Image: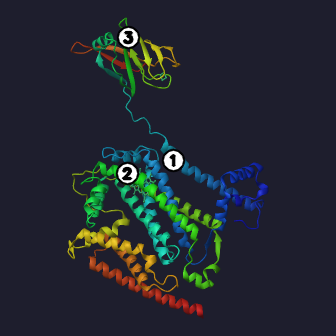
Amino acid sequence: MSLAALDSPPNRPRWTARLKEFLIDRLGLETFAELAAKKRVPIHRSTVFYFLGGMALFLFGIQVVTGILLSLYYKPSPDQAFESVRAIMTEIEYGWLIRSIHSWSANLLIGVLYLHLLTTFIMRAYRRPREFTWITGLVLLAMFLAFGFSGYLLPWNQLAFFATKVGTDITGGVPLVGESMLLLARSGEEVTGDTLARFYSLHVVILPLAVLAVLGVHLYLVQKHGMSVPDAAARRYGGPEHVPSMPFVPHFLLRDMVGWYVALGLLAALAALFPWELGTKADPFGAAPEGIKPEWYFLFMFATLEQTPSHVFGLENKQAVVLFFSLVGLVVLAVPFLDRRADRGGPRPALSFLATWAVFAFVVQTAVGLGLLHFGLSVSVFVSGALAIAFRLLMLWWCALDRRRMSA
Amino acid sequence: MMEATSPSTPRRAWLVRTLQASVAASVAAIFYPVVRFLWPRRGTVSSAAEVVAPFTVAQLKSLQEKGEAPPPFNFDNKPCLVVLMPDGDLRAYNGICTHVACTVTVRPGHGDIFCNCHNGVYDLNGQPVSGPPPRPLEAYKVFRRKTPSGQEEIVVSRST
Ligand code: HEM
Ligand code: FES
């Protein structure tokens, strides 16, 4: 429909007009046309944040397409998995490209989702009536992390094998049901061919279906409630309904597409310049290879696991870490209900501070995981806390300046 | 994109053409590697020039006298059949039916080669006799070779 708008009627041969009419009549396309015409995107300082969701959607599309292509040659068994991925890299034409794009895009996708979470938090886009949009979004994030984790094992190389061993072992730290969860995740006591089959099914059947369902709800809610307007913008224009906006179709969509095109170019460049490594075939009875690490998006947990002493308050190391991150997860999930003054547009100092602290802690811990910083746990906590306090003070000062400039 | 100027303005028309050309080029650049990826990899199967049948002439003869035939064996990744003719000659065929590719069976009792899928019948020379098969079976070269132990083994090779 957006393309139709590019063409003016006198130029168009009559049969295209008739075909369009035919399709609109039969398929009830006017419903979509009406929805599309109604959807508008507010224009303000943070409008760029609205691109992140669409970007995640695009990258998911890339994952579906390249993933289906990979599944045409990939063979999920311990005897063949590594060899089949090697064949994809060396024998199948452009196999290296498809696999590298799948791997790079997985990483970009999770990066974009982390940013999407952060920016919707900053805009307080989770407030009434958007609580479920927030919750479904977090569920999607968890599912995509599971996508990344399960995909990582599939090439059946040393790194993947041990990363999966460690990653699944941690679930054993969950109180009471940990043992059973571990058995269920690995399909046995050890990581074996059964684990591979299970992860493959999770990666190409279960998660895609589950994601489609939750994504459907998420997008329906976004469509239903429209884009949320941040308080600052609403204040500036004297109410959210006075904030200027542009039609989603075609104005915002075309801008979205420019972003997608750039992302595609970036992916192709990354894949060509840094093709994804394959490593060496997994050896279940060999020693763990040196420098074993999970993907960057799990590093902050990995670093915390490494820093935490063997016993904390009578809990074992991994139990304490699992408990801590579960609590963090629950708090993030409950954000819409913790922001008590949300409706009245009042400030949320405690939440803002905690979130700032969490972001700095994420950065510091990722750096620790990469080996860039050599901090103990208490140093990490202290440094990220201090950075958060400094940042909040800076923000307060900046807002005060802004207000003075506005009233002057 | 939708304001004042109409597509008939030359500059505008040129822009639209350029956009269309770039979109077409991008689509081609995306589909080309995908199509090449989908194309099956080049023959990774070894294609042996000749193969020794897993049975000797004597074994074949005694089986055929009982009205049975040995199962096909792999030659060049296809099922290969060997027939001992009444005059003592050997024949070897690619056992893939020329109709729609089932694997045929030698029936020494009937003195023919039969396809179970659609009742296609060939004679022992591989010529179609009745039923749907349109062409004769592909024939291979075959000869006997004496082994050090005094047996006669069967060697099949490509006909060209
Ligand atoms: C329907 C969607 C998907 C399908 C059918 C699919 C399919 C596959 C297949 C067959 C492999 C094994 C080939 C290989 O290891 O190179 C794989 C690997 C992988 N997938 Fe997916 N995938 C899908 C979505 C995703 C998503 C959404 C993510 C990211 C969050 C993801 C992340 C990965 C990762 C990290 C690997 C390992 C790459 C490697 O090292 O080779 N996949 N996927
Ligand atoms: S396939 Fe042999 S008769 Fe049809």
Q: Which residue is mark 1?
A: B34
Q: Position of residue A132 (x, y in %)?
A: 48, 70
Q: Position of residue A293 (x, y in %)?
A: 31, 63
Q: Mark yes or no: residue A268 visible.
A: no
Q: Which mark is residue B109?
A: 3
Identify the amino acid type marked 3. Gly
* Res. A260 in view: yes
Same chain check for tags 2 and 1: no
**Whole-percent x, y for residue A108 in the image:** 45, 63
**Where on the image, by quarter, is ligand 1?**
bottom left
Using the rendered image, report if marks 2 and 3 lie on a common chain.
no
Q: Residues within 10 Å of mark 3 (few under 14, many from 20)?
A: few
Mark 2 and mark 1 in contact? Answer it, CB < 8 Å. Answer: no
Establish if B148 lies above or below A222. above
Crowd rating for badge 2 (residues with CA inside 10 Å; few <14, some 14–19, many 20+): many
Residue depth check, mark 2 versus mark 1: number of the one nearer the observer = 2
Question: Mark 2: is the Cβ under 8 angstroms from ligand 1?
Answer: yes
Callout 2: residue from which chain?
A
Q: CA distance from mark 2 to mark 3?
A: 51 Å
Circle 2: residue type? Tyr
Binning the other alpha carbons within 10 Å of mark 1 as few (below 14), some (14 to 19) or many (20 upward) gives some
Vertical position of residue B97 compared to residue A131: above or below:
above
> In front: A309, or B146?
A309
